[in-house]
Amino acid sequence: MADIRSNFVGIKSPNPFWLASAPPTDKAYNVIRAFQAGWGGVVWKTLGEEGPPVVNVNGPRYGAIYGADRRLLGLNNIELITDRELQTNLREIKQVKKDWPDRAIVVSLMVPCEEESWKAILPVVEETGADGIELNFGCPHGMSERGMGSAVGQVPEYVEMVVRWCKANTRMPVITKLTPNITDIRKPARAAHAGGTDAVSLINTINSITSVDLDNFAPQPTIDGKGTHGGYCGPAVKPIAMSMVSEIARDAETQGLPISGIGGITTWRDAAEFMALGAGNVQVCTAVMTYGFKIVQEMISGLSNWMDEKGHKNLDHIVGRAVPNVTDWQFLNLNYITKARIDQDLCIKCGRCYIACEDTSHQAIANTIDGQRGFEVIDAECVACNLCVDVCPVEGCITMEELQPGAVDERTGKVVEADYANWTTHPNNPMAKVAAE
């Protein structure tokens, strides 16, 4: 059996699946149920400094984006950090950690960007026996308007400064949670690394408005006729999250920095993809809010079975394996040639490939075969864009076949030619001059 035990910056858990800081980790009742279901760890919902409690809205807190089958693709939330008293949270964290010593408990924190505020909260969190802290530099709504959350995460100098404060005032591992609401995710990651962070986690939610009520012309969710921007998460953000994770994993200045991957993870396959791109573990939120805590059981069995099937003995065998294959566009091989192929036995003659190609691509699909309705690729026009594969409703019906330059295409009898036979020295290659030198 594959060993899926996780040791993330010294924080051990029976599997790499953690719950992200969010409503599912807001209280002991939820966390205990999560652990009973099999989750390896949690990041407790963000705590603030002691004082007047945070006040959340008493109306709708979520907006949604649905697929055609009403499957939840994206969730927008306007909820703030925990509105429960600090001492109540601390007591519960201490008790849950005592009762579940084999599970990871990391505490998310957000206090004003002042050293004394961080110095005050770190010792009381440390006293609970928590395994680590996560600095919430990502929340894009409500708290950011008070100078916290993404208001800090968008300024690398602030990120480095706060990380240094925390590393100087706690024995706990420090995980820095990054905001995606920034042009270059590498800059705050580099800043956190310079400040001494033990790891980074990403992505936090994306600043968004998901919809507008066209009867009262207010963003949703609507509170007494008004709406506001919120944080967007769920399956729709997964591609953005994976790109940002890979950028940090392959950046020369942050290579080797542990990463906790977050963003739209719903299945074991999603988790494996994040880990292949450099994440040491993953955090899940929206999927649990949609399907419940027990989805972790499928994640555990799915990841274990896949690792067994592929011969991966432990998580170290897969973490970062895809990173060397992530490159810049200019280094892609333009001598690599593929052509679309339509399996006539699988084709249902819907014509979606033809319409997409004819109207928006390269007019490379014919809509008749021997005078009858049917669809066939015109090799001379096909540029291998893959759009037909993506729009086809039948899995496996259209595939891309690799052809070697200079070989004879058996279907057409023609010699396969590359666009640029000598791309490494071609003047259109921006790296040609560098290569020559």
Image: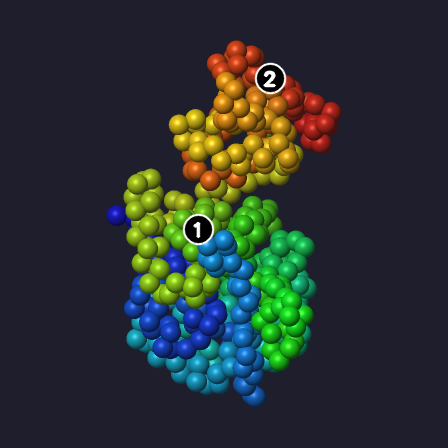
Colour scheme of the picture: rainbow
Task: Say which residue appears at 35% left-offset and 60% top-offset.
Answer: 295
Find residue 194 and report its horizontal and vertical position in percent.
61, 59
Q: Which image quadrant for residue 135?
A: bottom right
Task: Say which residue appears at 62% left-offset and 80% top-offset.
Answer: 224
In the rendered structure, find residue 270 and report the number of the disc placed on it: 1
State the quadrant of the C terminus: top right
Find residue 413 and report its horizontal and vertical position in percent.
52, 11
Task: Say which residue appears at 67% left-offset and 70% top-offset.
Answer: 217
Give the residue type that dot 2 points to: Glu
79 lies above or below 310: below
SS for tag 2? Answer: loop
Find residue 305 and report its horizontal and vertical position in percent.
30, 47
SS for tag 1? Answer: helix
Find residue 78 and report its horizontal and vertical position in percent.
57, 72
Residue closest to the far left: 1
Viewer-proximal residue among 344 and 205: 344
Q: Which image quadrant for residue 207?
A: bottom right
Q: Badge 2 is on which residue? A: 417
Viewer-proximal residue among 226 and 407: 226
